[in-house]
Image (cartoon, helix red, strand yellow):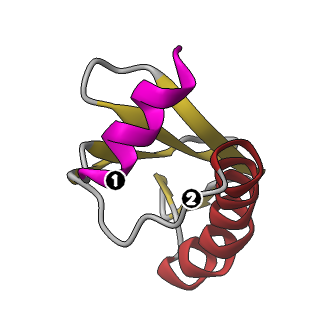
Amino acid sequence: MDESRVRDEIVSGNISLGIELGSTRIKEVLVTNDFQTIASGDYLWENELDNGIWTYPIEKIWMVFKPATQRWHWQFMTNTVLNSRRLGQSGLVP
């Protein structure tokens, strides 16, 4: 993707953060409006079987969000050298 176009998308706030809570990892992906990946990060984890239901303890979710976010944020800052103060939208896939 053209670097100047990525910068324009970032500056105008036309970027989105997708978050997936998978059974083996949390994945976060920062994308443009046409789904071009700008940066991504993940963190390995495991869900838990609780009374016959696979679940994610909320405390564990918050605990692993930080390292996953740090990974894509570091990649974003290294590749773009821009600070974005807003996202167009964010989605969560459980």
Residue 52, placed above or below residue 35: below
- Secondary structure under the numbered disc 2 in the rendered image: loop
Dot 2 or dot 1: first in sequence order is 1
Q: Is residue 66 above or below residue 28?
A: below
The label shown at residue 82 is 2
> For the residue marked with disc 2, what is the amino acid?
Leu
Residue positioned most to the front:
4
Neighbor class of circle 2 (other Cα within 10 Å; few <14, some 14-19, many 20+) is few
Foreground pick, 60 / 43: 43
Cβ atoms under marks 2 and 1 closer than 8 Å? yes
The segment highlighted magenta reads: 1-12
Q: Position of residue 76 (x, y in %)?
A: 64, 50
Residue at position x 29%, y 58% in the image? 87
Badge 1 crowding class, 10 Å Cα cut-off, few under 14, some 14 to 19, many 20 or more, is some
Can residue 76 be seen from the camera position used here? yes
**Residue flagged by tag 1: what amino acid is it?**
Val
Residue 11's disc number:
1
| Rendered location of residue 38, percent (x, y) | 55, 34
Q: How many marks?
A: 2
Q: Nearer the viewer, residue 77 or 4?
A: 4
Q: Residue at x 75, y 68 (%)?
A: 67
